[in-house]
Amino acid sequence: MIIKENWFYDISDILDLEIVISKWITIWIYDSWNVNRKIFLEENSFLDYFSFLENNDNHKVEFFQNENNSILNVKYLLFSKNNKFIKSKIYSKISSSYSKSDVKILSLIWDNWNIDLDWIIEIDSWFEKIKWHLLEENLFLGETWKMKWIPTLLVRSDDVEASHACRIEKISDKKLFYLKSRWIDNKNAYLLLLEANIKSIFSCLSMIDNVFYESLINRIVNSIKEN
């Protein structure tokens, strides 16, 4: 599949294994990863990539920035429920100058649930002015859980700004107390705080396709309520 027009695309039901973002194109993609993907960014292309992964065993996506001045933003939510094991592998390769990649991942983990996240970034030699950043946030909602995260940076160029960080936390008791002091019961206060975290991942979609955004947020929140 070759994308040649600026637009928002939901490719969840598209079975093409390769997606090409044409030159000088600005697009937004939502993908639930029904198949393993390879996504290629051409020169001066811009991609905001969103995904919500729920209750599936294995996911794999590969990004290739092979031409100069491409920008990639990845934001997605991992949500494992009903004692399911979710495994996600993401590979990103930059073989171009003046390219950027920024990744934010939020994992919601309940009791006895397992998430295995493997991210590999490879930056080739002889390229310059490359920026790559990864932030992994884990929000634990129970007492016992297991999270495995393996970030791998293969950097062969000297002119690179690269970093990765991991944050692990639970729902703040102070924030819960504040909401309950405003006559919000504990369950709804908990859901409000979770919803705020989820919206921080997908907020850009509200400006692109608000109907899709609201539908997605409602689906995620309703899935949480079932637990």
Image: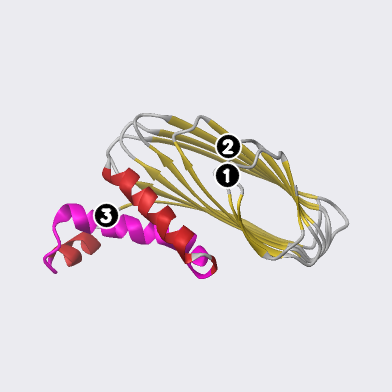
| Res. 226 image quadrant | top left
- Residue 61 within the magenta-colored segment of the rendering: no
- Residue at horizontal 47 percent and vertical 65 percent from the top: 210
How many numbered circles are shown? Answer: 3
Taking the image as shown, residue 43 lies to the left or right of residue 166, namely right
Tell me residue 198's x, y (percent): 40, 56
Q: Earlier in the sequence, mark 3 or mark 1?
A: 1
Q: Earlier in the sequence, mark 3 or mark 2?
A: 2
Q: Which mark is residue 191?
A: 3
**Stretch of the chain drawn in magenta:** 181-207
Badge 3 density bin: few <14, some 14–19, many ≥20, Cα 10 Å: some
Tell me residue 116's x, y (percent): 51, 35
Q: Which mark is residue 150?
A: none
Taking the image as shown, residue 109 lies to the left or right of residue 192, namely right
**Dominant secondary-structure state across the stretch colored magenta:** helix
The alpha-carbon separation of the residues under discs 3 and 2 comes to: 28 Å
| Res. 12 image quadrant | top right
Amino acid at dot 2? Asn
Above-or-below relation of 179 to 31: below
Q: Nearer the viewer, residue 62 or 214?
A: 214
Q: Secondary structure at mark 1?
A: loop
Above-or-below relation of 92 to 27: above
Q: Identify residue for label 1.
A: 12
Q: Nearer the viewer, mark 3 or mark 1?
A: 1
Tell me residue 196's x, y (percent): 35, 61
Q: Quadrant of the C terminus?
A: top left
Amino acid at dot 3? Leu
- Residue at horizontal 39 percent and vertical 45 percent from the top: 108
Q: Identify residue for label 2.
A: 34
The alpha-carbon separation of the residues under discs 3 and 1 comes to: 26 Å
Mark 1 and 2 residues: CB-CB less than 8 Å, in contact? Answer: yes
